[in-house]
Amino acid sequence: MKKNKLQNQRDKATSHLMNYVEKPKWALIKQEYFGDMWAMVANNLGVSDDEVIQQLMDSGYLQNAIIYLLDNVFTLHWPDEPMSMLEEYLKQRGWRETPHARQYLRALSQSTVGLYEVVGVEKGEYIDVKELNYNHVQRVYDKSGSQNIAKWSWFAGRVLSVGKRKIFSGSVLLLSAEKVEDIKNELERYRDVFFEELKKKNKTQASENLSTDTMRQLANIQVSAQMQDIIFAVWTIGAYLSLTQARSIFRNKDDELFKDLTLKFPVNDNNNKNTIKKLNEAQFLDCVEKDIRWAWIDCDKNKIPATGTTLLGEFTLKAKTIKLTVNSDGRAQKGKTYLKELLGEVIGEPLIMENNIDKQLEKNTSQQVQPNAVDVDDKEIVEMIHATLTEHYQKVLDEKIPLLDNKTPRQCAKDKNMHGKLIQWLKGLELSSNKATPQMQNYDFRWMWEELSLQYPEN
């Protein structure tokens, strides 16, 4: 109850910030910042910012992006402004907040965005994290987050010290290890560009006369100031490409973009006898379930070639409706025309519904990993699965891995220059296992590290 009460206080304080940011001065800053960030992403992708926003909205990622950007608007120091928006709010309106909420807002105002790797999880309780380039482990208490994140995951976000505990602020942006590398490379590139600009300026303006160390420090400060924007750009570009490329992969045999469509036609037939008769006699409909379901195929059902036929869709007859399921707009239109020609005035105009393919795939995946077939508590079966995994990974240690520059893990273990990639590969194996079936989640990968003479990272 106490935790919920404190969370409610933080939520109320955030709501007050959302209202405060609509004051004319801050609303203009927010609008310009949001515009700049969306434009930066859109220009990199070669599309409009509306297209980027729409893709994130359709896939449920937009709220995360907006909350992340709002935290930046609240906490960054803007030109010609003596203090950040959050500092100004605390000075003018802080008195209205509870002591806990004020403590939370002060911690937020002093926070910066960091890149964190998850090094331990206690589901339903906390997440142990390490910030990039730091060895110190921070324990962040987050009940819901700890149930949905796996060890060796990466994310960008703000970790706040509030009272005796650390918590997350706003949203976190989940990142793959590859995206973290992209961010590090982009930060390094930005640092080099700014350092070179300082060197040129130093040569042309003798009065500056900055030392190399000073210029490097200034470059680091500049990179730190841009870090939250670079992280956002890499995350958003990656999300957009992942969403659009995944969808473009799914095409049917007619080379039409995959869409999971359902058309529901109203039927005006008292007992459906005539409708059933016509569907059974139809040349291109093959009965799957008597008087209920028919497969719509691309050839005469009595002359199906030895090589088989293409399933165009499926018709299902209910008491007052006929449902057609197809996988593209083109087939939906053809199916509608075909049924109209077959049944005429018996059917009316259909209600058309599109099922989100990403949600469907997510649903199918979650169904596959449910422990229905195997009891996770059956020690004997779990031991058998783990023994099979060990046998498999023993062979993998001697196989060439594309992510390891087509070298085997054992070869990489002997090459210190490859240790970074090898460690990341091993973490990736464990991360994939943690996301798999419950029987695999407790598999201990430490033996692989020992086999390769590497020290397993402990908290």
Image (tube, helix red, strand yellow):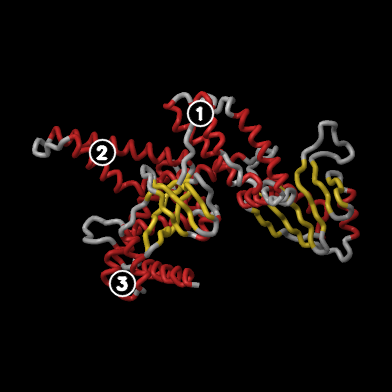
The residue to which callout 2 is attached is: 194
Q: Which mark is residue 94?
A: 3
Q: Is residue 268 left or right of residue 404?
A: right
Vertical placement of 157 versus 429: above or below?
A: below
Residue type pointed to by label 2: Phe
Front label number (1 vs 2):
1
Crowd class of label 2 (few under 14; some 14 to 19; many from 20; radius 10 Å): some
Residue 174 location in percent, x, y?
48, 49
Q: Which mark is residue 306?
A: none
* Spatial separation of the CA atoms under disc 1 and disc 2: 32 Å
Front label number (3 vs 2):
3
Q: Nearer the viewer, residue 239 or 248?
A: 239
Residue type pointed to by label 3: Gly
* Spatial separation of the CA atoms under disc 3 and disc 2: 38 Å
Vertical placement of 145 versus 179: above or below?
A: below
The residue to which callout 1 is attached is: 404
Task: Determine the residue positioned at 30% across, 75% down.
Answer: 95
Vertical placement of 375 versus 28: above or below?
A: above
Task: Determine the residue positioned at 16% across, 36% down.
Answer: 211
User: Within the image, what quadrant is residue 27 found in?
Assistant: bottom left
Disc 1 element = helix
Task: Determine the residue positioned at 63% across, 43% down.
Answer: 257
Task: Determine the residue positioned at 49% across, 42% down.
Answer: 176
Residue 336 location in percent, x, y?
74, 52
Q: Say which label, 3 or 2, has the lower sequence index.
A: 3
Residue 227 location in percent, x, y?
34, 46
Crowd class of label 3 (few under 14; some 14 to 19; many from 20; radius 10 Å): some
